[in-house]
Amino acid sequence: MKNNTGTQSFNAGQYVYMKDNQSKPVVLPQKPDLNFSLPSSVTSSGDKGSSQGGDKNKQTDCIVR
């Protein structure tokens, strides 16, 4: 994660809260109770690889919470 306070790395399975772009991220002690499911584009076995930027006319398929 990178913001105005610097860059920090986290491990898979860690949950992190960041109040705003001026605050350091805080690792949460346990999994937060969020209703969350991955979009089908992430869980499907379709095309592999990644893209950045993307088509501005397409609807966002994944939101970081």
Image (tube, rainbow, N blue to C red):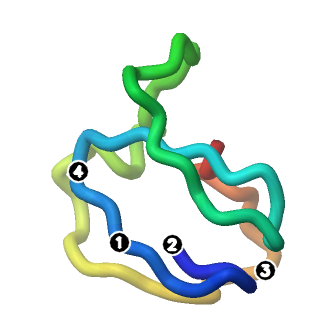
Which residue in the structure is indicated by mark 2? 1
Which residue in the structure is indicated by mark 3? 56
Q: Quadrant of residue 31?
A: top left
Q: Position of residue 51 (x, y in %)?
A: 44, 85
Examine the rendered structure and indicate whether residue 24 appears above or below residue 8: above
Q: Is residue 36 left or right of residue 41?
A: right
Q: Nearer the viewer, mark 1 or mark 3?
A: 1
Q: Secondary structure at mark 2?
A: loop
| Marker disc for residue 12 | 4
Disc 3 marks a residue whose amino acid type is: Lys
Disc 1 marks a residue whose amino acid type is: Ser
Disc 4 marks a residue whose amino acid type is: Ala
Which residue in the structure is indicated by mark 1? 9
Examine the rendered structure and indicate whether residue 55 appears above or below residue 23: below
Disc 2 marks a residue whose amino acid type is: Met
Question: Mark 3 or mark 2, which is nearer the start of the sequence?
Answer: 2
